[in-house]
Amino acid sequence: MSLFSYEGFAILTVLMLALDLYQTRGGKVTIKKAAIWSLFWVALALLFNVVIYLYWPLMAPESSYTNGQAATAFLTGYLLEKSLSVDNLFVFALIFGQFSVPAHLRPRVLMLGVVGALILRGIMIAVGAQLLSEYHWVLYIFAAFLLYTGYKLWKEGEEEPEDFSNSLPVRLVKRFFRVSDEYQGNKMLVKDSKGWIATPLMIVVAVIALTDVMFALDSIPAIFAVTQEPFLVFTANVFALLGLRSLYFVLEGMLTRFCYLRVALAFILSFIGIKMLLMETVWAIPTPVSLAVIALSITTAIVASLWKTRDQVEQTQ
């Protein structure tokens, strides 16, 4: 077993998750600390991209990709998944606000969300890769789904934020448990003379789990348009999710300023859907072009958003 096998990379992932959990011990995460760790996780992903470029034949001996093609595909997939994961942050912030999650519990909830997302995406990658290898027409279903998701995401920007207080996970928890009004530290269940009581933390974790499923349904078809190499799809997802917690604490107070980000994500998903439709035609879009489009779209959205909302900063000073 080596780093270049699924087993070896799975062990590396567990070690990286342990490191991420260790650096947020105590429940207090400063913006400075979160920013440093965000840069660390990005640097680690870029380092792994170099490893792919140098050792790709050892990672996937049967792959038709050259070292350069594999590295470009990983970088494009990583940037795509990282961009889509920012949308997770908007929803996480909304959930934390609606359920009044204490600040010291948020790192733990985010870790549970990341672990849940990794497990779900691992399963979906395995299923998706198998489907694509046996039924090529599934690509067109994925493409249609991405185009629909892009349209839906565009419309969401014009609607009121979703209310999770009566969502399916909340109703399920309340159906099987009594629910307390107050958080009980890290406990999701507490016991009294009448039996077990669910704390609000259990409801929050259940809602986060549902959002993990919804985001996986968007992101996995999208990255299969970039590459259908399962190892690249899996590793790109892992590295994109690893820095999600740190990125949340960096951007927590700035999320409202990214007013054009969802528009950019809607465009990217639509672009990826079109790329998937054209994959087997003479108009197929090369992966380096996809990389440039994704990078340019996100950069433009961030710069334009920060410029448009610059008055928010001036008003708080």
Image (cartoon, helix red, strand yellow):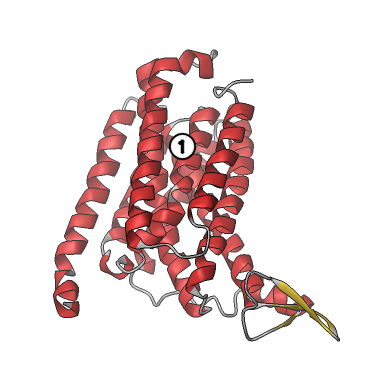
Residue 183 or residue 133, whichever sits in front: 183
- Check disc 1 and report the residue beneath it: 236
Please name the residue shown 38% across and 20% down the image: 53
- Choose between 113 and 74: the one closer to the eye: 113
| Towards the viewer: 96 or 104 | 104
Q: Residues within 10 Å of mark 1 (few under 14, many from 20)?
A: many
Q: Amino acid at mark 1?
A: Ala
Q: For the point 14% across and 63% down, which residue is it?
A: 307
Locate the C terminus and report the quarter of the image it occupies.
Answer: bottom left
Left or right of residue 126, residue 311 in this image: left
**Can you give x and y, in whole percent of width and height, for residue 244 in the image?**
44, 52
The kind of secondary structure element at disc 1 is helix
Q: Quadrant of the N terminus?
A: top right
Identify which residue, 174 or 33, lies in the foreground: 33
The quadrant holding residue 70 is top left
Left or right of 125? Residue 149 is left
Q: Is residue 152 above or below residue 82?
A: below
Q: Establish if 221 lies above or below 60.
A: below
Q: Position of residue 205 (x, y in %)?
A: 61, 66
Please give left or right for residue 191 compared with residue 46 in the image: right
In the rendered image, which quarter is residue 247 located in? bottom left
